[in-house]
Amino acid sequence: MSSGSKQASVSTDSCPGVDRVVNLLQKAVHDELLSGACVLASVGEDVFLSVAEGDRALGLDSEAPPQPIANTVFDLGRLTQGVCTATLMMRLVSLGKVSLTDRAARYLQGLGVGQKSKITLAHLLSHTTGFPAGISVYDELVKANAGPRPGILSSSGAKQYAYNHFKNATLRFEPGARVLESDINYVILGEICELVTGLSLEKAFVRYVATPMQLGSINFIDLTILRRRRLEPIVELFSPMGICSRRGRVIAGEVWDENAWVMGGVAGHAGLFGTVGDLHKWGRALLDAVHGRSDIIAPEVATMFLGSDERVGCGFMSASKEDGFSLDESNGSHGRIVMNGTGGSSVFLDCARDMVVVFLSGMPLSHQNTRKLNALRTEVLQAILQ
């Protein structure tokens, strides 16, 4: 690994735990747990912690020159569910275009049969539909691409195939019975967003979320457009996600998630890219809405999504030990957490404290280190909260 370019910075007055956060990140980089990480935290408009340690380690090449990580564009992975899809739903509910009690079959005819006819938008958002986890369309589409349908990968046909395949999956239990996190829920919500807005998902995100919230760096990378125009992303700007054995290369500037990749890089469950600064700005926009400081999202809608006491609310999960966040309830934290376990990326929102904490890191340099990365993330958040 390259030696890295240390870029620790702390804004405003020091507070308990700041030095601890800096030391934790420095040690993680030194021990080669990860190539680099960024943490940005605020209460209200006061940013009290801004730390960037390590480098992008482009290509995971130990001989590569250090690249600063502070302005790196990260693959946000499953954070896409909250940042794009759930926030789009907030906007559509605020505008009166949809209701959380709407049946999904109102928008998608394929969900109008059997138990699936009971599925509501709230069920999809809260992972209580009964759709199974771990379903992939990658192998089927790669096989089709090598056979009679060359070029189907990352095409509109592949995306429609994925939509149909996921909607046809057999439910594991009756909608509303319990929580089972499944990417299918957010793939389907992405399709519903497209139908309601009359726009592709990436354009709907730009119009209803990114533009009003001024999120200049957060967006999808549409692989269909890149291939059609023979364009290449500037990989030097991106934190690499590691070497994908199935694709046979280092993944940087294209989505890591395989289902999102074969769908063209744009899906309701994964595909967003962005910087720590804009991800923090998104978190602040949501808390502004909760506290009635926003004209983008109605406060009652924001509270509906973020204020639930349920384990999994409408797009946002309660911080818990299950996610690697062993929070001490005695500190009064009742935050919501959106996370991507693959790369360690997370956003912690605490409505009561009006606090946003963003943690972004590159892929662990060893997949065996994923558990250690979860523990690191917990220690960082604990240090900030204490």
Image (tube, rainbow, N blue to C red):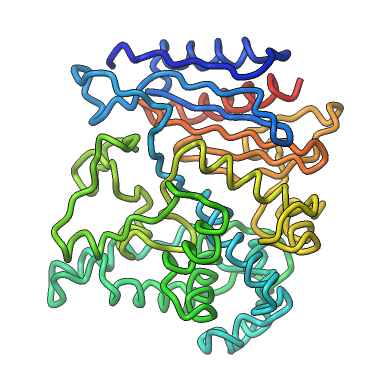
> In the picture shown, does residue 73 fall above or below 368?
below
Which quadrant of the figure has residue 120?
Answer: bottom right
Residue 307 located left or right of residue 141: right
Q: Quadrant of residue 122?
A: bottom right
x, y (%) of residue 80?
A: 50, 53
> Camera-side residue: 329 or 17?
17
| Rendered residue at 83%/31% (across/down) | 329
Residue 234 vs 81, above or below: the answer is above
Q: Quadrant of residue 50?
A: top right
Task: Please say if 365 is above or below 252.
Answer: above
Quadrant of the rendering where the C terminus is positioned: top right
Q: Which residue is at 53% across, 89% downward?
A: 109
Q: Position of residue 180 (x, y in %)?
A: 63, 58
Residue at x-position 34% and y-position 15%: 4
**From the viewer's perspective, is 191 left or right of 249?**
right
Residue toward you, 265 or 178: 265
Rendering coords of residue 16 (x, y %): 73, 13
**Quadrant of the frame with the N terminus:** top left
Is residue 177 or residue 353 the one in the foreground? 353
Q: Give the percent coordinates (x, y) of residue 45.
A: 69, 35
Residue 306 sits above or below residue 156 on the image = above
Which residue shows up at 48% across the image and 75% down it?
Answer: 194
